[in-house]
Image (cartoon, rainbow, N blue to C red):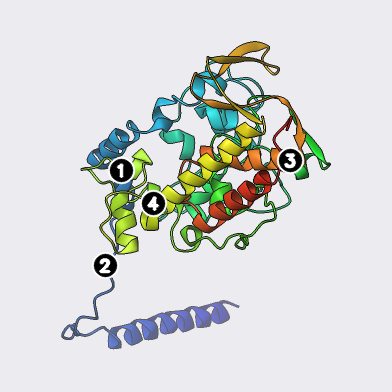
Amino acid sequence: MKKTRLFFQFVGIGVFAISLLIAGCTKEGPMGPAGADGTDGIDGTDGNSTCLDCHATEVKSNIEAQFAMSVHSSGINAVDYAGGRASCAQCHSHQGFVQYANTGAVAGDITNPTAWECATCHGLHESFGGSDFALRLKDPVHPIFDPAITMDLGGNSNLCANCHQSRRAEPIIDKPGDTYKITSTHYGPHHGAQANVVAGVGFAEIEGSVAYPAPGSATHLAQASCTGCHMAEFDNENDQGGHTYNPSLLACNTCHGVTETDFNYGGVRSIVEGQLETLRDELVRLGVVEFAQESVYELNEETGLIELVALPGEYVPVVGTYPMVQARAFFNWAGLEEDRSLGVHNPKYVKALLQNSIEALEAEPTPGS
């Protein structure tokens, strides 16, 4: 037994000795010469550069200065009048729009509504890429007047369409029949249905001598955009573009390849202005519209308050029941007056609406004749 144990001890020592010998024989030699350098990789980008495009102190200050020139910033057209009402707040106050963008609705009246600010339109970034402006809404819009259809003004311009659209369908769709009752001096599409005009939808397409262009066929939809014209690079000389939202004549001239001094390209604005006046006069003749000799006040049924709805010298609808064609023509006149582009947004559509409305009213007899 002792001899066996001794044998295995000798074997173990032998194996250990051989291992040392082998290790000593495979020792690493001196390092050879260095190889040639590999090809350089592509330089990375500055992780802060995209952020600084908007958030650099100077850039941010310039944007804020431009925004301070805008009606959106002052809230002069909307906040005091409608910013607190749940039914209006989604477009008439900062708080209401943020609620609507986040949840799809406004929970209730806003106690202390304020005007728009940066965070009204801008929320959280998604990709942090150069074109990610963190807009709260940019998908195509299902309009209030007909949620079954889609208005797609293209990317960032869809943000504008959430508010700049008609709040009601045109009369024959709203309440089909031979007559239509105008129940308020507030009646009409809304105070800024520009998205309808650009998209070529939502107005009263009365039959007449002028054919209507296909929806979505406007040049300013296919080749321009809300942001392209109203938020082009800021023109410091004329205070246009950028975050003023004032349309940029410089940008328009560049696109049209001309050097005009106003937006009356091809005389379109002059033609449409004349059509609007003619249509208005026809509505006055028929008693649908009247010239306010003094301030007009009306009870707002939503708030229970008496409100100013027209100043002396303004034209307002006369509450009453009218033949359907007259109510439809009024709808067009009111909406296109409030569009305020005098046809620029969609010349073919606007001129067709106005001319066909004029022809239809000229065939209507004067009341009492």
Q: Is residue 176 above or below residue 156?
A: above
Separation (CA) of disc 1 from disc 4: 10 Å
| First reached walking from the N terminus: tag 3 or tag 4 | 3
Crowding at dot 1, Cα within 10 Å, few <14 / some 14-19 / many 20+, comes out as: many
Residue sitting at x 42%, y 80%: 13
Residue contact between numbered discs 1 and 4, judged by CB atoms under 8 Å = no
**Type of residue at label 3?**
Pro
Q: Which residue is mark 2?
A: 43
Q: Which residue is mark 4?
A: 229
Residue 291 percent coordinates (x, y): 55, 24
Q: Position of 122 compared to 167: left or right?
A: left
Q: Are discs 2 and 1 less than 8 Å apart at CB?
A: no
Q: CA distance from mark 4 to mark 2?
A: 36 Å
Q: Amino acid at mark 1?
A: Gln
Question: Which picture quadrant has residue 188?
Answer: top right
**In this rendering, which labeled residue sits more in front, label 2 or label 3?**
3
Residue 59 percent coordinates (x, y): 26, 42
Mark closer to the chain start, 4 or 2: 2
Label 3 secondary element: helix
Task: Assign a secondary structure to mark 4.
Answer: helix
Pick the front one: 140 or 23: 140
Quadrant for the C terminus, please. Answer: top right
- To which quarter of the image does residue 282 belong? top right
Q: Amino acid at mark 4?
A: Cys
Residue at the left extreme of this rendering:
33
The first of marks 2 and 1 along the sequence is 2
